[in-house]
Image (tube, helix red, strand yellow):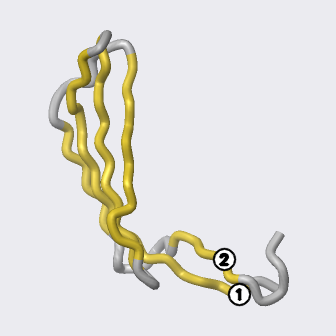
Amino acid sequence: SYGKGRAKTALAVGKKHRQFKVNFLRSALGERLECSSIVKRKGRSIVFAESEVFSVQGSERKLTATASITFAISTESQE
């Protein structure tokens, strides 16, 4: 629960400023999938993040897909 005057940050669904892009590079074959993600830039109203997905077979990791997302965030006061 948020205290009075505290801010809450949430994904601004339905806003113009958002993009989601996925590049599928190869079939995801292997024992498991691993994903690594990082927020590259977080401003007051826009966030940009990137991800990489690897297929893993034994000790071999192959890049399977990449993704990037840009989305708007909003700050709402909770009472």
Place of residue 73 in the rendered image (x, y in percent of width and height, measured from the top left):
49, 77
Circles 2 and 1: CB atoms closer than 8 Å: yes
- Badge 2 element: strand
Residue in the image at 45% along x and 84% along y: 44
Whether residue 34 is situated above or below residue 40 in the rendered picture: above
Residue type at numbered disc 1: Ser
Question: With 6 as the anchor, is 43 left or right in this view?
Answer: left
Place of residue 58 in the rendered image (x, y in percent of width and height, measured from the top left):
31, 10
State the CA–CA distance, disc 2 to disc 1.
6 Å
User: Residue extending furthest top?
Assistant: 58
Residue in the image at 50% along x and 75% along y: 12
Q: Which residue is mark 2?
A: 8
Of pointers 2 and 1, the one earlier in the residue sequence: 2
- Badge 1 element: strand
Place of residue 1 in the rendered image (x, y in percent of width and height, measured from the top left):
83, 69
Residue type at numbered disc 2: Lys
User: Residue extending furthest left?
Assistant: 25
Q: Is residue 78 visible?
A: yes
Question: Who is closer to the viewer here, 37 or 77?
Answer: 37
Graded by Cα atoms within 10 Å as few (under 14), some (14 to 19) or many (20 or more), the crowding at tag 2 reads: few
Which numbered circle lies on residue 77? 1
